[in-house]
Amino acid sequence: MVIRKLYVPPTVAKTVPPVVNPNVLPPAAAYQPPGENVPVIVEPEGSGTSNGGGPLVFADHVELELAAGKIVGRRKALPNGTEYCSYQGIPYAKPPVGELRFKPPVPLEQFEEQPLQCGSERGVCLAIFSLPIGTTGVEDCLYLNVYTTSSPTDPAGLLKPVMVWIHGGGFYTGSGNSDFFGPEYLLQHGVILVTLNYRLGPLGFLALPSQGIHGNQGLKDQQLALRWVHDNIAQFGGDPSNVTLFGESAGSASVNWHYLCPKSRQYFHKAICQSGSVLCPWGLQYNPESKARKLATVLGYEGEDDASVLETLLNASAGDLVANSIKAFEESERSIYLVSPFIPSIEDPSSEDAIITHRGEELLKQPNATTIPLIHGVTSAEGLVFYAPLDQRFDEFAANLAMTLPLDLGIPRDFVPAVVEEIRQFYFQDKPIDRDGFAHLLDLVGDVGFYFPVYAAAELHTRFQQEAPLYFYRFSYESELNQLRKVLNVPEGMPGASHGDELTYLFNSSILTATVEAGSSADQARTLMCRLWTNFAKFGRPTPEGDEVGFQWDPLPPTSSGEPFVLRALDLNNQVEVIENPMHERIQFWKSLAERFNPNLLA
C-alpha cells in the first residue's frame, strides 16, 4: 500500500463567534460559509452548552405556500447564531394504507389540513426494531423534513444547493428524523437539507408479481420524495437543478440504485454513497414471491392461491406483518448480513415504475449511462457493525464460517466446505478460531459486507462509467464524535472507525451526543467533513479551485480494458493522505473467489 501525505490540520485557536442579535439577522441568502480563521463551534444537544443543550429557538413561526397548501414551520438558530427555518413532517404521498398497502406511493395533491402545522416530526415507519429504541412506528409514515437558511420574507436571491439524505438501517429500521439527522452542521455551509422516511421491511419491499405487487415500494417512496423536492424546493430557496442525493449503509445502496435508474437520475445531479453499494450482500433478495407466500402462511393462510395470499397480507395488521416478517426467511438464507428477508428485489422491467430491472453489476456495466459525479467510501472498521451479533453467537459462527459467506457469490453447495477452509486459512491461518481471533472475524465480515462490494462497484464504475467522475474516501477519524459504535454496543478501546461513525461528523443528534471543544481535532474534522460534502454539492468537486482546504482530492482515473484497477482513496484522518489499494490482499482474496464462482461480476 502506497501512502502519500497531503495535509496536517493547523492548530486552530479556540475563538468564540460573535454574538448575533436574533432580531437583527442578515438575510439568509447573504450568508456565506465561515472563513478558515473562524472555527465553527457546534455543540450537539445535551453537550452542556449555555442553552441547556437544546437548540436555540425563535418564538415565531414561519408560513410557506406550496402547491398542496400552506405549511407552518419554526424559526430556529444555528450554533453560529444565524437563523434557519425548520419544516418537519411534510407529507409527500398519500398514506400507504388500506388498498394502497404494498403499492407504489401516490402523490399527494392537497394537504388535509390548511394550514398544515409542520413544527415537529410525524410518524416513523414500522420496523422490526425501532431506532431510537422505544420509538413506535406507524404505517402512515411518508413524511419529509426541509431545513433551510432561506426565509419566505427574504428578498429574491440565488437559490441554494440542495442535499437530500436517505437514512440507513438495513431496509428494516431507521428514519430521517432529527434524533439522528439534525441539520445544523451542514446548513452552516450554505446548503438546504432534506431528510425523509420510506417504507421498511415487508411494507416497503414485499413482492408478489402475480398479483401486481412488484416490490421496492421503499425505493419508489424515495424516488417520489426526490420528485417532490424537484417540484417544491424552490419555494424553500433551493435550486431544483442542483440536488445532491446522499445516504449511508442501506441509504447508500439506495443512492447507488437510483444512480443506475434513469427515471431517478432526472431528479438529482450529484451522489454520495457512504458504506454501501448495489453489490452488498444485504441489499438484494431472491425469490421474493416465496417470502411473501411464507409470510402469509405464518399469518395463518394454508392454501396455494396467490390472490388469497395477498388477501391475507392485506387483512393482517401492519404490526403483525412486521413482527412476523423474520419468519419468512428460508433456512438457506441464514447469514449474519441479513436481518429482514424483505429488502430490494429485481422487478419485471415492464412493470409500473420499475427501479431495479437487472442485477447491480449488469446495470453498472451499461457504458457511460450517466455523467453524474459520485463519491463512494467506507470507514476504516466497517466490521464493527457486526460486533454485537458476533459476540453473542461467537461459538456458532466460529464453528460454521459458511454463515459469513455472501449468498450471491454463487458457490455450489458441494464446494462450500473447501471455500470455508480457504477462508479459515486466509484469515486465521492454522490457529483455532477462538476469542483471540475475534478481530480477524470482524475483518472477514467487514470485507464481505462492505469492503469488497464497494470496491467492486468502484472498479466497475471506472471501467464503464468513464464520463462520470468518481471520488473515493476511507473515513478513519477516531475521536469523541465517533458515536454510532455506542448504538452498536462496540466496547471502548476497539480500534478503527465503525460503520456509521462518520454520521455525527455531518449531522447533529439528540441521541448521540458528545462535548466538542472549539479548535479540537474533532471540531476541525467535523468542519472539514461538512465542507468537503457541501463543496461537492455546490460544485461537483469536494476541493474546488479557490477553496483552499490544504489538499486536492482528485477523481479516480478511468481504467482501460485489460488494465488492473488501482484504488486511490483519500484517507480522512487527523493527517489527510492519499492511500493506494488499501486492504489490497483482502480485496484480492475475495476477487479471486468471485472470478471462480461469479465470473461475470467484474468481467
Image (cartoon, rainbow, N blue to C red):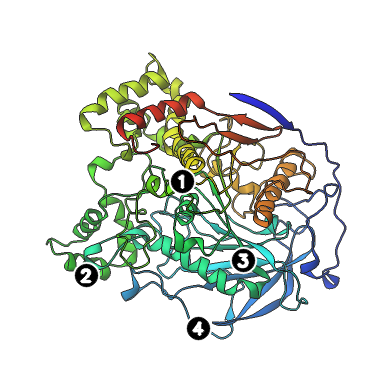
Across and down, in percent, residue 243 comes to: 60, 62
Q: Nearer the viewer, mark 3 or mark 2?
A: 3
> Which quadrant of the view contains residue 234?
bottom right
- Foreground mark, 3 or 1, reads 3
Sequence-wise, the earlier of marks 1 and 4 is 4
Name the amino acid type tagged 4: Gln
Which residue has dot 4 on it? 110
Occupied quadrant, residue 574: top right
Mark 1 touches mark 4? (CB < 8 Å): no
Q: Mark 1 — residue?
A: 277
Residue type highlighted by circle 3: Ser
Q: Which residue is mark 3?
A: 241
Secondary structure at badge 4 equals loop
- Give the CA distance from mark 3 to mark 1: 25 Å
Which amino acid does the dot numbered 1 rest on? Ser
Quarter of the image for the N terminus: give it. top right
| Horizontal arrangement in the rendering, residue 142 relative to residue 511 (left or right) | left
On the image, the x and y values in percent for residue 543 come to 71, 46
Measured Cα–Cα span from mark 4 to mark 2? 30 Å
Of residues 543 and 429, the one nearer the viewer is 543
Q: Nearer the viewer, mark 1 or mark 2?
A: 1
505 and 261: which is toward the camera: 261
One can see residue 283 in this view: no
